[in-house]
Image (tube, grey):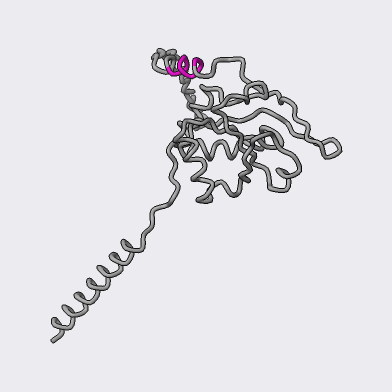
């Protein structure tokens, strides 16, 4: 009887376990957005390529301007033909479809905000999602009596060739350097002198 009860318990437990796994499989949803590039690849590509556009170069037909500021700021003043997609709304299905359509038609997505620093995070997000043609417009936006004023912003660029430096460092790392042989220090062991015992005895 005890063995029969044990068998029943095991079969009930295994049935429940299988049911839980099946429910988990049927209810599991893959995330809508997955990164096409990992952080390491993204940083390497960004350091080796130029992803900046200035005001002189925005009149290209392939460029599509995306204003990442809020709707209020956009209405206050924006660049001609710009589309307003506020940064927190980038992953909305409607806006993702806009980005996908731009990618499929080989358009360059040019992001701009109040300054280039404001566009760094949206740029990295889009790049990692696989929108490789995304660029940053290097401008600063200001207002004078509610009139939009734009000026080019200087971006700090490295004078050194970072990619060449990394390759040179990697080559040097493969060279085996012979370690210097340092002679072992001499160990001096002091010898204790035996104390002379006092002479015993007398006359």
The residue positioned 54% from the left and 28% from the top of the image is 62
Looking at the image, which is closer to me, 7 or 12?
Answer: 12
Residue range in magenta is 164-170
Name the quarter where the N terminus is drawn.
Answer: bottom left
- Residue lying furthest bottom in this view? 1
The residue positioned 59% from the left and 39% from the top of the image is 121
Magenta stretch holds residue 108: no
Residue 183, relative to residue 71: is it above or below? above
Residue 164, relative to residue 111: is it above or below? above
Residue 157 position in % (x across, y down): 63, 21
Residue 13 position in % (x across, y down): 24, 74
Q: Main secondary structure of the magenta part?
A: helix
Determine if residue 196 is in view: no
Residue 106 position in % (x across, y down): 47, 30
Total numbered badges shown on the rendered structure: 0
The quadrant where residue 144 appears: top right
The quadrant where residue 51 appears: top right
Residue 16 appears left or right of 138: left
Looking at the image, which is closer to me, 140 or 149?
Answer: 149
Looking at the image, which is closer to me, 176 or 47?
Answer: 47
Determine if residue 121 is in view: yes
Residue 101 position in % (x across, y down): 48, 39
Magenta stretch holds residue 167: yes
The quadrant where residue 134 appears: top right
The residue positioned 52% from the left and 49% from the top of the image is 94
Residue 51 appears left or right of 187: right
């Amino acid at each position: 009887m005890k063995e029969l009860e044990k068998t029943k318990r095991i079969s009930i437990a295994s049935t429940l376990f299988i049911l839980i796994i099946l429910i988990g499989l049927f209810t599991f949803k893959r995330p809508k957005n997955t990164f096409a590039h990992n952080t390491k690849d993204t940083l390497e590509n960004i350091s080796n390529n130029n992803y900046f556009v200035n005001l002189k170069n925005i009149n290209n037909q392939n460029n599509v301007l995306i204003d990442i500021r809020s709707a209020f700021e956009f209405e206050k003043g924006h660049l001609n033909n710009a589309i307003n997609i506020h940064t927190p709304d980038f992953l909305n299905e409607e806006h993702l479809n806009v980005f996908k359509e731009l990618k499929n038609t080989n358009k360059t997505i040019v992001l701009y905000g109040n300054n280039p620093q404001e566009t760094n995070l949206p740029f990295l997000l889009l790049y990692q999602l696989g929108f490789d043609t995304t660029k940053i417009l290097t401008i600063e936006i200001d207002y004078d009596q509610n009139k939009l004023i734009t000026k080019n912003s200087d971006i700090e660029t490295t004078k050194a060739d970072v990619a060449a430096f990394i390759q040179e460092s990697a080559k040097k790392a493969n060279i085996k350097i012979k370690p210097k042989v340092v002679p072992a220090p001499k160990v001096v062991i002091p010898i204790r002198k035996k104390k002379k015992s006092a002479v015993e005895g007398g006359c």
